[in-house]
Image (spheres, rainbow, N blue to C red):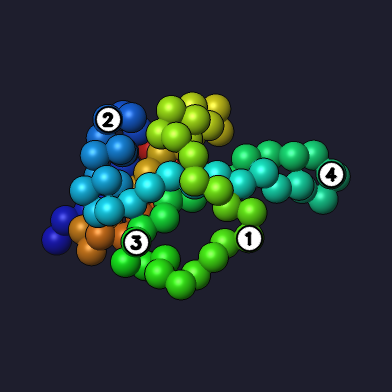
Amino acid sequence: MKQAQMLTRHRDIQNWVTDRRGRPAIARVRDRFGDERAQLKLRFSQHDEGREDSGMSPCSWTAWLAELDRQHLALKVDPAGDCELVSRQVMN
């Protein structure tokens, strides 16, 4: 049985997502104190058909990957093809 992989290299992340017809998206959300932060998401054509996420906007890979690094996140992918953004601290 294969284990989930943690992707941190920009090229690996972008290749994995684009191979699955995905694209980056970002939203600005406010926390309970009113501070604004970026929320990252990957949108996949086959999964997101007809579904709109409030406040999510397509963005460039450059902006998305810079925010991924700023938040110290990695892309966790499992053998079934599912993915999620997780803290890089989980890797240690």
Label 1 amino acid? Ser
- Label 2 crowd (10 A; few <14 / some 14-19 / many >=20): few
Q: Residues within 10 Å of mark 4 (few under 14, many from 20)?
A: few
Mark closest to the chain's N terminus, 4 or 2: 2
Whether residue 72 appears in this view of the structure is no
What amino acid is at disc 4? Gly
Along the viewing direction, whichever of 51 and 70 lies nearer the viewer? 51
Asked if the residue at tag 4 contacts the one at tag 3, i.e. Cβ–Cβ closer than 8 Å, the answer is no
N-term-proximal mark, 1 vs 2: 2
Per the image, the residue denoted by label 2 is: 11
Q: Which mark is residue 34?
A: 4
Q: Which residue is mark 3?
A: 45
Residue 44 locus on image (x, y percent): 36, 58
In which quadrant of the rendered view does residue 37 lie? Answer: top right
* Label 3 packing within 10 angstroms: few (<14), some (14-19), many (20+): few
Q: Which residue is tagged 1?
A: 54
Q: Is residue 27 above or below residue 53?
A: above
Distance between the Cα atoms at labels 4 and 1? 18 Å
Of the numbered discs 2 and 3, the one sitting upstream in the chain is 2
Determine the residue positioned at 55% across, 27% down. 70
Mark 2: which secondary structure?
Answer: helix
Q: Amino acid at mark 2?
A: Arg
Left or right relative to 7: residue 62: right
- Residues tagged 1 and 2 counted as in contact (Cβ below 8 A): no
Residue at the image point whose x is 41% and y is 55% from the top: 43
- Front label number (4 vs 1): 1
Q: Secondary structure at mark 4?
A: loop
In the picture provided, is 1 more to the left or to the right than 65? left
Mark 2 and mark 3: span between their CA atoms?
20 Å
Q: Compared with residue 59, is residue 10 higher up or lower down, i.e. above or below?
A: above
Instruction: Give me the residue at 34% from left, 61% from top.
Output: 45
Q: CA distance from mark 1 to mark 2?
A: 28 Å
